[in-house]
Amino acid sequence: MQQATVDVIVNEKPYRIGRLTASCGSWIRSVLVGSIKVSGEGKDDPELEKRMSEMDPKERADGLVQMLWTTCGSGLSEEAYRTVQTRCLQVVSMENGAGPVPVMMKDGRFAVKDLEYDGPTVDRLVVEVLKFNIAPFFLAGASSQPSRSPSDSSPSNAPK
């Protein structure tokens, strides 16, 4: 059975990362991989491929999902980008001593108001969610499955 949560420290604050549903995680993986194909990123780079092949598989998968998130902006609509970001932040809670506080409410508003204008922390939390939830797809070889076309990546198709 998979680990249900992982604790991380981001900007000296403790957070707990939870699991995305399998359908949501699969959709996000497809959207991110598809966005790279649309943007033209990820062209053949023999030197990069060599370095990647020498890496530990977990490090390689974590690096891949971080790269996918960092570069997806040019291949996603703002709506799709926000949908992925919101889905990720909805599985994050901040530990505040009195118990966990969800970072984002179900309606997409920030429950932790300090984060609403803290782009670097929000981005790092999204990357942590992706590493915990999406990297296993690449470790299991799921990346060989066909990605959805960009038309299938609209936020209206996003699983909850």
Image (tube, helix red, strand yellow):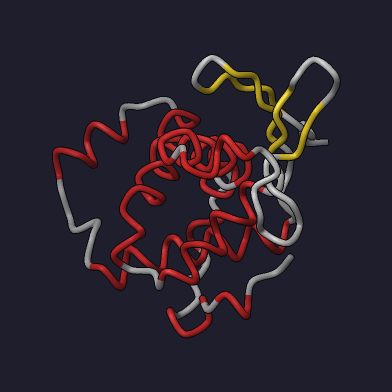
Instruction: Tell me which corner region of the image, top left, top right, bottom left or bottom right, holds residue 109.
Output: bottom right
Viewer-closest of 133 and 73:
73
Name the residue: 31% across, 34% down.
53
Viewer-closest of 47 and 31:
31
Taking the image as shown, residue 109 lies to the left or right of residue 148, namely right
Taking the image as shown, residue 83 lies to the left or right of residue 104, namely left
Viewer-closest of 50 and 61:
61
Residue 138's place in the image compared with 114, above or below, is below
Taking the image as shown, residue 141 lies to the left or right of residue 73, namely right
| Percent coordinates x, y for residue 64 in the rendering | 39, 43
Name the residue: 55% across, 38% down.
115
Identify the residue at the far bottom of this view: 151
Residue 70's place in the image compared with 8, above or below, is below
Name the residue: 36% across, 27% down.
55
Residue 94's place in the image compared with 80, above or below, is above
Name the residue: 79% across, 34% down.
4
| Percent coordinates x, y for residue 136 in the rendering | 59, 42
| Percent coordinates x, y for residue 154 in the rendering | 53, 79
Q: For the C terminus, give its image quadrant.
A: bottom right
Q: For the N terminus, give its image quadrant.
A: top right
| Percent coordinates x, y for residue 19 in the rendering | 73, 43
